[in-house]
Amino acid sequence: MIQYILRRLLQIIPVFIGTTLLVYFMVFALPGDPIRALFGDRPPSEAVIAQLRQQYNLDQPFWVQYGLFLKNLFTFNLGVDFTGQPIAASLGRIFPVTVMLAVEALIIQTVFGVTFGLIAGLRKGKFFDATVLVASLVVIAIPTFVLGFVLQLLIGVQLGWAKPTVGANADWGNLILPATVLGLVSFAYVLRLTRASVVENMNADYVRTATAKGLSRPRVVVTHILRNSMIPVITYLGASLGGLMGGAIVTESIFNVPGVGQKLFQAVIRSEGPTVVAIVSVLVLVFVIANLLVDLLYAWLDPRIRYEN
Amino acid sequence: MTTSDVRISEAGVADTPLLEIRDLAISFKTGSGEVQAVRNAHLTIMPGETVAIVGESGSGKSTTALAAIGLLPANGRVSGGQILLDGEDISHASEKRMIELRGNTIGMVPQDPMSNLNPVWKIGYQVKETLRANGRPSGPADVAKVLAEAGLPDAERRAKQYPHEFSGGMRQRALIAIGLSCQPRLLIADEPTSALDVTVQRQILDHLEKMTSELGTSVLLITHDLGLAAERADKVVVMYRGNVVEAGPSLELLQNPQHPYTQRLVASAPSLASRRIQVAKELGVETDELLAPSSSAGGAVVVEPTKTEDVLQIQNLRKVFKLRSGFGKSTDFAAVDDVSFSVKRGTTTAIVGESGSGKSTVAQMVLNLLQPTSGKIVFDGVDTSTLNSKQIFAFRRRVQPIFQDPYGSLDPMYNIFRTIEEPLRTHKIGDKASREKKVRELLDQVALPQSTMQRYPNELSGGQRQRVAIARALALDPEVIICDEAVSALDVLVQAQVLNLLAELQSRLGLTYLFITHDLAVVRQIADHVCVMEKGKLVETGSTDDVFDAPQKDYTKALLHAIPGARLMLPPEVA
């Protein structure tokens, strides 16, 4: 088991180098000059530009730039971005916000997705089931930016139940609206996955046997139907965590959340290689570790799965 | 002896029955309206008595039993009659009342040990929750005691394991432990051993019998096996298409069956006494008559005695699997160890053994689906290991398989025409019109209507599907057919029909069969030669009569002894 975990952790190294190299190259290959773009219509003197280029190593060939980036990374020096801010400091500001947003979204989609999915599955073919299925389809079909603006206007502005935008001071309370929007799409998938899984397990022989043993209905549902149905759902949830963290660009923009998505978007627009790669590196780590956790959780949930060497 | 006559109890002379089912009707709601699954079922179980319901799948035997414990599927309901438990009608009892009764008054041992234990909970927990739900002490010691009583060795340690770490027999013991853990007065045992090897089956049933007689538990045994029912039960109730057609004391019913269905059931019970199926040379003979045992002189008859050439020779066949034992180490496991035998053209050779004996591995190697570690398989004079891919393709045309599970081996998305036509298309035989003609002929050969072509596997019964599988195997006019447990999944009457069909096809087409089975009774009916395998080795081989009448090895004797009903004396006109 420990060997398995170690091997998985070692696998992070090639994945990490591969992804950063790829992302660094893509930023490098972007058309346009990032330094000139910084100054807009009033270009500074050539001397200033040359000096800035040298400062950010932009005058070096690609491999040297990437090598310097790796070297800095391993000495925990992420450098400064084009506005002169240390990148490490801004990562320290934006990541907690996004983690908060993603975790809140994850909780919302899990609690509601599993609950509704379980009830729908148990009442397969009844009114509740049909309604929930259609509603979840609608949620999947509507793009995030539509859903985001509609909820912002309806709940944030007209009803005034939640703050329509987040602003600088993000906390659990004022992130509720963006977290709901972010969680809604995955919520629909979690619901459908749970429902399908419950429907399948509900008719399993061991469920009938559990009933024959004299267990009460709630006990049968929780220990035998729900427990077994969670296996595919957990896998999906773990995989969606990475998506929630990195894929919140639209939601973060709509609700003005100072998080990873917004920062990443700005950095891409400005061709700020080091910032983009720094953010992506952390996201890669989040993805890989989330997947490892899912695999471990999977083995815990389903004792038939054992990781060998 | 706890047997008490049915009529006495019905007249109210004897003590009150524990369970009495009166005029029970059960219907299912389906897409095409209500379907009656059980009509006017009646049976009586006295305290301490064992009653068996016998019938084929779809006869309503399981449905009747499930109604007694309130576990009918969601679309089923009791539409008439009464289920009296100790005088209380529970046919429409509330769910609350049923939860009270389940476990400590009515226990259940389900059919399939593989699917009836929840794979994600430890065995101990699944026992513990039963004890707890019925208000009994449920500490680790109590759990271990319950498991030990069901004959599980080393119960304390075993309780900490998961179902997948148990063998089939062990799981069934765990399920028996669960069913009896709260000492119910009535135990419903639904085909409790049909998924197990005969020798394991015998041990489990012996143990169940011992436990229930010690506890004084009444048992409602559901089975498709008449021999087993007669051997284990005081009374037998025969169900056919939802009706109870006959009921009475076991031996009496077996020796003097009244209803035509029971008579057929008794006649086709693959008992030890039956002889090899003889194919009537004249056409137009009723299939049931063909099947009638001892319709001609005894003794195995080779269908075409002129054919004596060996079509298959297996020489010193060996297959070693590497078992991983952690940390990069592996141990060798010889699944098949130095097996040699030969198969004469036009005859049937059976390989028998329990699960894990290596019989299916032999079949896979003969089919060239698995490479032997050493040894040779010579087909028609050619060593099959020397064939190149093109020759293997040609070889496959001459050697075809029929597999065990007619539900799993047909593609559900292919209609029957496409299923049977596929091998012809793969081997580029004929054009569209000639292939269609061939499929029609094949369906005729296996006695299926030509209209079957447009249907899909899920619309057919198990027996019909196995006929389709046979037609598919015959499509390429093979010389050898490997039947891997080809009739094990079928009901006894359907099994008899399929065996009969195979025998008829053999005599007509000169086919050679290699028959892999765990069922010795089937061997008796179909095989000319028998190879008995145990733990990868060939322990005994000889003609069917020699092996059955004078088994040499203890293992063969144990196998023969374990056949349900083997100890029963059948009347001469049946046996």
Image (spheres, coloured by chain):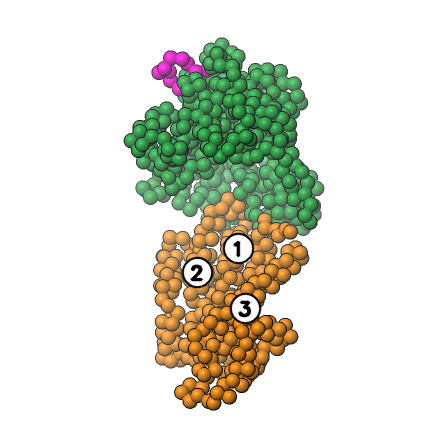
Identify the residue shown where x is 36% and y is 64%: A141
Check the residue under mark 1 and report the chain it is in: A
Q: What numbered label is drawn on residue A231?
A: 1
Q: Which residues are magenta?
A: B278-288
Answer yes or no: is residue B420 visible.
Answer: no
Q: Position of residue B531 (x, y in %)?
A: 59, 23
Q: Would residue B139 appear left or right of B57 to someone viewing this image?
A: right
- Residue A187 in the image, given as x and y percentages of width and height: 44, 64
> Residues under labels 2 and 3: Cα distance?
30 Å
Distance from Cα at disc 1 to Cα at disc 2: 14 Å
Query: Which SS class for mark 1?
Result: helix
Query: Residue beneath label 2, please?
Result: A189
Q: Check the residue under mark 3 and report the chain it is in.
A: A
Label 2 is found on which chain of the structure?
A
- The colour applied to the residues of chain A in this rendering is orange
Q: Name the residue beneath numbered marker 3.
A: A20
Q: Earlier in the sequence, mark 1 or mark 2?
A: 2
Q: Which mark is residue A168?
A: none
How would you classify the magenta stretch by its main secondary structure?
Answer: loop
Q: Tell whether label 2 touches label 1 (CB within 8 Å).
A: no
In the image, the chain rendered in green is B
